[in-house]
Image: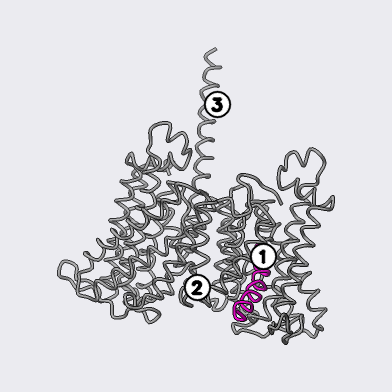
């Protein structure tokens, strides 16, 4: 039983990070039909920006702030203006391919300008174990889980409780009507790109201490986030959260109870089943777009 | 392409074919390998172009079919079977698996379909890696023989390049014929307006499955040539990134254009090699080039040409109208 408990906690912690990435992914899809194949690389990059700031002599807290701001500038603003805006009106597929190329470019840039080796990354939550219900649980897992949940709750509150959030939802659901009633749709779309950049930077900060900073580390993460987004429901923030947690737990349980060789197959089979029998996702509603 | 005079087009085609036969004769081993790889990837991309470009069904699994073909060829030829027999089996197996993979396409479309095929691709990779009794696992299969064609050994790079080029020619002719047959028109009807196609009596169900199966079968052909080309295969080249690369080839070349896959494969296989002189930067520059091209022309390289020709035609047509109008006025 203790084994199962540990697996669940560790699974929820990675799942919460997947959820952050998946939420950003669905936000981009809803507001601007962008399937971002570089989402995993978007998580990989901020850690290196922070490391670069620390190499330049900045203390850790300043490096975090600089890293997040730079991510919002590069992965939010520049990504939208240079790649998404010119291509958006030409349909989903060319843009998706362009983000694949972007993923290659980001990986190669980090490899060339930083390092091809994995670098250690400091943890913002204290390491060590604490005892919960008689089980030793790593503080890191708990800290990651709490921070991720906090971020997700913050985002949901922003979307559902504030006027800004309502404007963003309106811009996503029906841009034409939103424009007529005076919602600055363009600014709202830009805002979702900035939020996505913030979320991936946060995910980067949380996951890199666990898996080290490496230029290829986005590949697995990006795929896990896609799957989480689809399983939960492509058009629902809470779907993406549920999907992320589910994939995290499923992955950890599969590694322990199915063969390690085929652990990666479990989420895939689950994904195929969900798409075939409930294409709108576990929590999604059919043919509807809501933030 | 109809803006060119027909003899000019034929002459241009003949020059390209002659160049593909003659120029590589004094290439070194590596140059021939890259060019053979181009031919093989062009075959796989042509298959995906049928599925995606003509029938409009997104697939992220073409790399898995190249893998299936490669493993069939590797296993059969190392057990003494001739390559043509292996190609036939590779076609049959890829066709059957592709047919089954087409079933989800009857239910879901677009990005959902992309993700189902993506999941299939990952599952296929896991099978290649883990079923070591069949595929050799991570150690792969080595010493894959190259075939004797009409009694001629093709062990050397140049003869085998001609095998790849010849196969590309045969596949091209077959695809050329297919897209001009009623089947090709049915595929395009499926892409443009499935509902209307169905109401006109096109069996959309059958043609969707067919589009997947034929496209996948060509992936199998490419794989069956890839195995003897590299003479050693392991699971790594057939992971998801090959499927993504092939998709990129189709889009960059121009999806739905007959010549698109040739150009796309050229960009994806040859451009990185030409950029090698920039050393560590070559893949970065390649990525920037692909993004730049897609921003400039989201319909790919042939999209640029198509747009240019369409503009010229409109200009020519309006010039003719102006002439006709002025004649009319002088008569009055």
In the rendered view, does B111 fall on the left or right side of A184? Answer: left
Residue of label 3: B322
* Mark 1 touches mark 2? (CB < 8 Å): no
- The x, y position of residue A267, in whole percent, is 53, 66
Q: Which segment did they paint magenta?
A: A1-22
Residue of label 2: A263
**Quick one: label 3, few (<14), some, or many (20+) residues within 10 Å?**
few
Question: Among all residues in the image, which is located at the extreme left?
Answer: B151
- The x, y position of residue B157, in whole percent, is 29, 74
* Chain ID, mark 2: A
Quarter assignment of residue B93: bottom left
* Chain ID, mark 1: A
Residue of label 1: A19
Camera-side residue of A233 and B265: A233
Residue B208 is covered by the magenta coloring = no
Q: Secondary structure at mark 2?
A: loop
Count the labels in the image.
Answer: 3
- The x, y position of residue B305, in whole percent, is 49, 48
- The x, y position of residue B71, in whole percent, is 33, 70
**Quick one: label 1, few (<14), some, or many (20+) residues within 10 Å?**
many
Q: Nearer the viewer, mark 2 or mark 3?
A: 2
Mark 2 and mark 3: span between their CA atoms? 70 Å
Residue A13 is covered by the magenta coloring = yes
Residue at 34% in and 42% down: B183
In the rendered view, does A279 fall on the left or right side of A144? Answer: left
Image height check: is B239 above or below B51? below
């Amino acid at each position: 039983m203790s084994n199962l408990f540990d697996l669940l906690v560790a699974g929820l912690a990675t799942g919460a990070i997947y959820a952050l990435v998946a939420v950003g992914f669905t936000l981009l899809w809803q507001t601007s039909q962008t399937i971002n194949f570089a989402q995993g690389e978007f998580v990989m990059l901020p850690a290196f920006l922070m490391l670069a700031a620390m190499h330049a002599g900045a203390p850790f807290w300043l490096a975090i702030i600089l890293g997040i701001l730079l991510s919002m500038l590069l992965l939010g603003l520049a990504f939208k203006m240079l790649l998404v805006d010119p291509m958006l009106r030409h349909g989903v597929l060319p843009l998706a391919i362009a983000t694949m190329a972007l993923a290659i470019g980001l990986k190669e840039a980090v490899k060339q300008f930083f390092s091809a080796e994995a670098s250690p990354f400091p943890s913002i939550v204290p390491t060590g174990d604490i005892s919960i219900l008689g089980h030793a649980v790593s503080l890191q897992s708990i800290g990651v889980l709490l921070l991720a949940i906090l971020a997700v709750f913050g985002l949901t509150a922003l979307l559902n409780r504030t006027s800004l959030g309502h404007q963003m939802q309106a811009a996503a659901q029906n841009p034409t009507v939103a424009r007529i009633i005076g919602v600055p749709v363009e600014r709202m779309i830009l805002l979702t790109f900035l939020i996505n950049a913030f979320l991936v930077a946060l995910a980067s900060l949380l996951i890199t201490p666990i898996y080290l900073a490496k230029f290829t580390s986005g590949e697995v993460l990006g795929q896990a986030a896609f799957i989480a987004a689809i399983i939960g429901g492509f058009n629902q923030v809470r779907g993406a959260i549920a999907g992320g947690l589910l994939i995290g737990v499923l992955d950890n349980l599969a590694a322990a109870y199915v063969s390690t060789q085929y652990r990666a197959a479990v989420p895939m089979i689950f994904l195929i089943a969900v798409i075939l029998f409930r294409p709108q996702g576990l929590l999604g509603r059919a043919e509807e777009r809501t933030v | 392409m109809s803006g060119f005079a027909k003899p000019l087009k034929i002459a241009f085609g003949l020059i390209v074919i002659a160049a593909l036969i003659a120029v590589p004769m004094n290439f070194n081993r590596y140059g021939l390998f890259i060019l053979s790889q181009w031919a093989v990837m062009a075959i796989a991309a042509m298959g995906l172009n049928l599925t995606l470009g003509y029938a409009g069904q997104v697939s992220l699994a073409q790399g898995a079919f190249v893998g299936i073909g490669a493993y069939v060829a590797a296993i059969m030829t190392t057990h003494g079977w001739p390559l043509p027999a292996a190609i036939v089996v590779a076609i049959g197996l890829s066709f059957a698996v592709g047919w089954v993979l087409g079933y989800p396409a009857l239910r879901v479309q677009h990005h959902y379909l992309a993700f189902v095929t993506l999941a299939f691709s990952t599952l296929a990779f896991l099978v290649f890696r883990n079923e070591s009794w069949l595929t050799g696992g991570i150690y792969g299969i080595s010493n894959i023989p190259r075939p004797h064609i009409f009694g001629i050994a093709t062990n050397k790079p140049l003869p085998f390049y001609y095998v790849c080029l010849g196969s590309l020619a045969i596949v091209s002719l077959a695809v050329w014929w297919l897209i001009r047959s009623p089947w090709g028109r049915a595929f395009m009807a499926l892409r443009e307006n499935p509902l209307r196609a169905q109401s006109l009596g096109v069996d959309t169900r059958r043609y969707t499955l067919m589009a997947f199966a034929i496209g996948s079968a060509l992936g199998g052909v490419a794989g069956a040539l890839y195995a003897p080309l590299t003479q050693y295969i392991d699971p790594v080249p057939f992971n998801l990134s090959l499927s993504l690369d092939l998709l990129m080839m189709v889009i960059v070349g121009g999806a739905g254009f007959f010549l698109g896959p040739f150009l796309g494969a050229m960009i994806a296989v040859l451009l990185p090699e030409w950029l090698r002189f920039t050393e560590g930067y070559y893949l970065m520059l390649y990525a920037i080039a692909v993004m730049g091209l897609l921003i400039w022309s989201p319909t790919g390289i042939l999209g640029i040409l198509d747009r240019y020709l369409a503009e010229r035609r409109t200009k020519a047509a309006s010039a003719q109208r102006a002439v006709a109008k002025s004649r009319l006025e002088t008569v009055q």
